Image (spheres, rainbow, N blue to C red):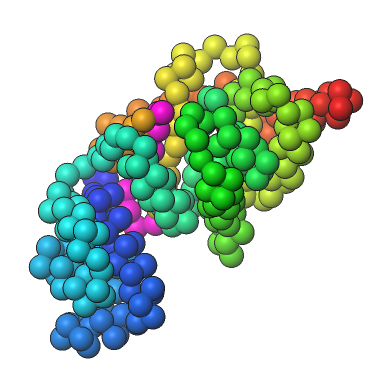
Amino acid sequence: MARRKGVSVRQRRVSTQLRAWRIKRGLSCKDVARALDWSESKVSRMETGERGLYVDDVAAVLGFLRVPAEIRQDVLDLVRTGDERNWHEIGSAPLSRMLRDLIRFENEATAIHSFELTLVPGLVQTADYARALLRALPGSRSEEVTESLVASRMARQRVLDRIDPPTVQLIVEEMVLRRTMDDPVMMYGQLQHLLAASARRNVSIRVLPFNAVVAVAAQGSLKILDCPGQPPLCYEETRSTAAFLEDEEFIDKARVAWKRLSAAALSDDDSRQLIAELAGKLRSAT
């Protein structure tokens, strides 16, 4: 059976932005439809990604919603390239945009699979851990900016509190849990938070141990998102690039990599035991 193509990640981003701008203006789909002499269902389908997007239609909505010209041009460029699959961006500014899109897709997802090689996954970071990471990054930023970024990371975790939360399966390399970043108290709190998160019925946190022989782990972190009514997405990120991958070959390879990582990881119970033991050692040391 052929895999459902759905709309591209570019069009899904535009659909989400259209809805966000409408809500920001305090308008309903019916308000937009009446102003543009369209059906309400057309506006709704444009916002949910259930139909393809056309430049003229999107330009009309953006104009009615009084979206700033510079933003309008970026959105229309996405519509023009909407049929292209996979999306790569380079540079720190695009990375922040891609992160915002990742958060949106996480909020839509029914299942999230994530392997982290160097960091605690963002969905289960504590504020202190996120703060330590941000302060360790190169470049200078004010405490106000740092705290704003921390708040954004914490807001990302609200997906776990949805009425219908996604199934979240996380695999973390063991060294991530042993790295204290010169702050054992902070890391103790982070490990305790992982134990609490793993008690959620929809969250699995497993550890890839030192002695696991999995070559695919060396290829870096991995995230797969399954979204209802849309094809799955694979998200990959490095220091200066980020990418949403949609083609079947990428998704299939990501599924195989996840299967190998899952087979090599400790069980949920053994992972909790290891995390508790590491937390106990930190508590004794402090």
Residue 224 picture quarter: top left
Instruction: Give the residue displayed 20% in from the left and 86% down from the top.
Output: 35
Q: Position of residue 263 (x, y in %)?
A: 55, 24
Instruction: Using residue 103 as the reference point, say whether residue 11 is left or right of it.
Output: left
Q: Quadrant of the C terminus?
A: top right
Can residue 241 be found in the magenta stretch? Answer: no
As drawn, 285 above or below 62: above
Instruction: Using residue 159 as the reference point, say whether residue 255 is left or right of it.
Output: left
Residue 252 picture quarter: top left
Farthest left residue in view: 56
Give the number of callouts: 0
Instruction: Give the residue displayed 58% in from the left and 34% down from the top.
Output: 135
Q: Position of residue 31 (x, y in %)?
A: 29, 86
Farthest right residue in view: 284
Foreground of the two, 47 or 98: 98
Q: Position of residue 67 (x, y in %)?
A: 25, 69
Q: What residue span does the magenta drawing correspond to? A: 228-239
Instruction: Give the residue displayed 69% in from the left and 49% down from the top.
Output: 200
Residue 184 picture quarter: top right
Q: Is residue 264 visible?
A: yes
Q: Position of residue 121 (x, y in %)?
A: 56, 37
Q: Is residue 109 visible?
A: no
Instruction: Give the residue displayed 29% in from the left and 85% down from the top.
Output: 30
Q: Quadrant of the N terminus?
A: top left
